[in-house]
Image: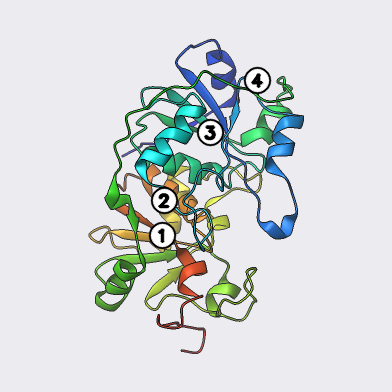
Amino acid sequence: MNQRPLVSVEWLESQRGDKNLRIVDGSWHMPAEQRDAQAEYSAGHIPGAVFFDIDEHSAAGDLPHMMPQPLDFAESAGALGLLPGNTVVVYDTKGLFSAARVWWMLRTFGFSDVKILDGGLPAWSKAGLPLDSGKVALSSVTPAINFAADAVVDASQVLAASDSRSAQILDARSQGRFDGVDPEPRAGLRGGHIPNSVCLPFTELLDSDARLKSNEALAAVFDSLGIDGSKPVITSCGSGVTAAILTLGLYCIGRNDIALYDGSWTEWGGRSDLPVGTAVG
């Protein structure tokens, strides 16, 4: 089944006059990169795009950018002028990185027609298409949110799946972090991985220009890991951002039985009561 929710820059340029279209800059960067995604948006974005701040539109707490409550998300999405009936196109400044997280969030909160710009802002700029500066402010709306609770799992659910092997757990972090031999970018976290999980660095799903691979190539990657089509999948990563790239890749090849572990390694590696696997055990 092909359910690939990517659109080309040519398609987006041709549709920009559609009053039902909403364009969203969903750029986010790791803290160590010391990049200000909102400032970069203000300096240059696709005309008409609003900025979706992943951290701002998340639940308050000790863990980064956790899913907010439905009413809170309705308020923040509405303030950006986004309604579930809109056609929403999300992009980011890297090609494909954080846009997948915004795509997943919107879908989980009932936005049914969410697409990702293939190649992101780099592809738009390479095509010589225009950029605007400043901030876009659309009229506030009041969306009716339909939250898909089964799209998100917590640590207790992941632990149960790990123990019983009732679901396949895919980890989007690098092999070195998965094995516990490379340091975690966040201080205070143990090294290693969730027991009985499989390492699939998100970069394995991307071409050299940070575009998502073809569906055939995606299927080959998952097949090479022995992913069982009869079991549901849980995706995880460092803090729930790149896990969404694995979710997107699985969705593209027809999988819908996918949940994302929102706390990911920031939660699991920071809790001494949860088991850890490493390269040697």
Q: Residue at x 22, y 59 (%)?
A: 230
Q: Label for residue 247? A: 2
Dividing the picture into quarters, in which one does residue 142 lie?
A: top left
Measured in 3D between alpha carbons, the distance from the residue under mark 3 to the one under mark 2, in whole angstroms, is 16 Å
Task: Determine whether label 1 and label 4 are within 8 Å by CB.
Answer: no
Disc number lying in front (2 or 4): 4
Q: Is residue 225 visible?
A: no
Residue under numbered circle 3: 90
Q: Is residue 153 visible?
A: yes
Look at the numbered disc 2 and give the secondary structure of its residue. helix
Is 191 left or right of 152, judged from the image as shown? Answer: right
Type of residue at label 2? Answer: Thr
Residue occupied by mark 1: 235
Q: Earlier in the sequence, mark 4 or mark 3?
A: 4
Q: Amino acid at mark 1?
A: Thr
Badge 3 density bin: few <14, some 14–19, many ≥20, Cα 10 Å: many
Nearer to the camera, 146 or 165: 146
Spatial CA distance of label 1 from label 2 is: 7 Å
- Dot 1 or dot 4, earlier in sequence: 4
Point out the tag, 3 or 2, that comes first from the N-terminus: 3
Report helix, strand or loop for mark 1. Answer: strand
Under circle 4, the secondary element is loop
Residue located beneath label 4 in the image: 47
